[in-house]
Image (cartoon, rainbow, N blue to C red):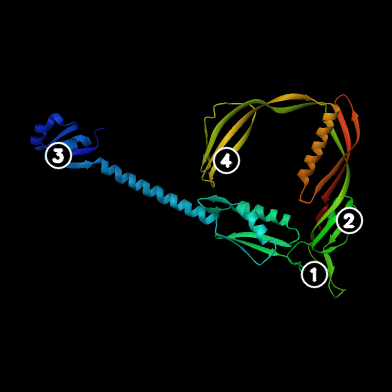
Amino acid sequence: MLKLYHLKIHKRDFFLYQEEIVLRNLTTDGDFYCFYTDKKTYQYLKNNNCEIEILTDYINEAKKLIFIKKGFIAGVGLFLVSFFVSLFYVSAIIFNGNFLINDQIKAEISANYTTFLGLNFITDQRINDLNREVRQRHIAYEWISIEKRGFIIHVNVSKDELSKERPIENERIGDIVATKMGSIHMIQTFHGTPLVAYNDIVRPGDVLISGSFETNDEETEHLLMARGLVLARVFEYVEIRVDKNVVKNELTGKTSFYRSFSLFGLNFAFRNNQHFENYTLIENEVFRIFNIFSWKNVEKYEKSDIILTYTEEEAREFAESLIEAQFILRKTHALEKLLEILFMTVVEDDEGFTFNFLVSTIENIGEFKGRD
């Protein structure tokens, strides 16, 4: 590699040491020669006190360019780090008062931190999810809100119910009504007037919590948006149809492993050489820096369609698993439970089985219904 130095040397010195000179692109400039050479030749001429002039030092030029680029990259990196730190960094959690659940809520928030270099980070989406989850877990408190302002998370807890002397403004007026027939298991009223009690039998459309109440002046009725939780013991007949022959997409046993990288939303796969027409993926995240960069180990499992033939017992087990799955999907509160699935009858034909069950649950049967 000769283009490290562009030198100018007197012709006298050039002819004296020409056998030791390695050069390229020789040109004449009066009593001097100009040429490109390497570091070894430059040092040789310099050590022999030759009359030379460095026209261009490409090594220093490259160092300057690298320094400038490194400085630019470092500046951009520092800006990005500062930007993401300002968005997601958490320095403290502050409550609006001393409540019994403060430590518990603090632990629930801390469990959702992403820790990097000893610093704690949390996304706005996770804050929104925590708002919903914490309210569901602590239903005894009228209101809990979690908000991040700057580097600090502010938690506001309200224990006392709103005074019935004060109707809520700017909210939709209405009642909590029953969606199913059942026996009241638990009722908790946040706003409004409860109209049912434990063990009361209710039917669809019955008002459970009224959005109206009277003040000390019995001639005046106030309206508000009823809020509360009503759980009931519910019995329902459920019919499930299961075909005898079912096509299922199952694993074949063939697998492949590769690494997946993401940089600013661009995805790259390393050694993803095995191609399956039908497959499922299991991803294990190894490292992530927010949405800038992530590294995942990915396992790919081939799948294929197979035909399963159910016996009556197998079909019944499958039907019961469907009932459990359907209950989990419609579940809205942690206190809801599937108590019992009681088998009643089965009708078999050439195509499959029709099962009838009596299903017992504890369900949230309250639904808000606005007043016209």
Q: Nearer the viewer, residue 135 or 192?
A: 135
CA distance for labels 3 and 2 = 104 Å
Q: Residues within 10 Å of mark 1 (few under 14, many from 20)?
A: some
Percent position of residue 345, x then y: 92, 34
Whether pointer 2 and pointer 4 mark residues with C-beta atoms closer than 8 Å, the reply is no
For marks 1 and 4 on the same chain, the one whose residue lies earlier in the sequence: 1
Point out the tag, 3 or 2, that comes first from the N-terminus. Answer: 3
* Residue that label 1 marks: 164
**Amino acid type, residue under disc 2 in the picture:** Asp
Point out residue 174 in the picture as x, y percentages from the top left corner. Answer: 81, 60
User: From mark 4 to mark 3, how far is it between C-alphas?
Assistant: 58 Å
Q: Which residue is mark 4?
A: 285
Amino acid bearing label 3: Asn
The type of residue carrying mark 1 is Lys
Element type at mark 2: loop
Please tell me which of labels 4 and 3 falls first in the chain. 3
Taking the image as shown, residue 67 lies to the left or right of residue 235, namely left
Q: Where residue 339 sits in the image (x, y, percent)?
A: 84, 45
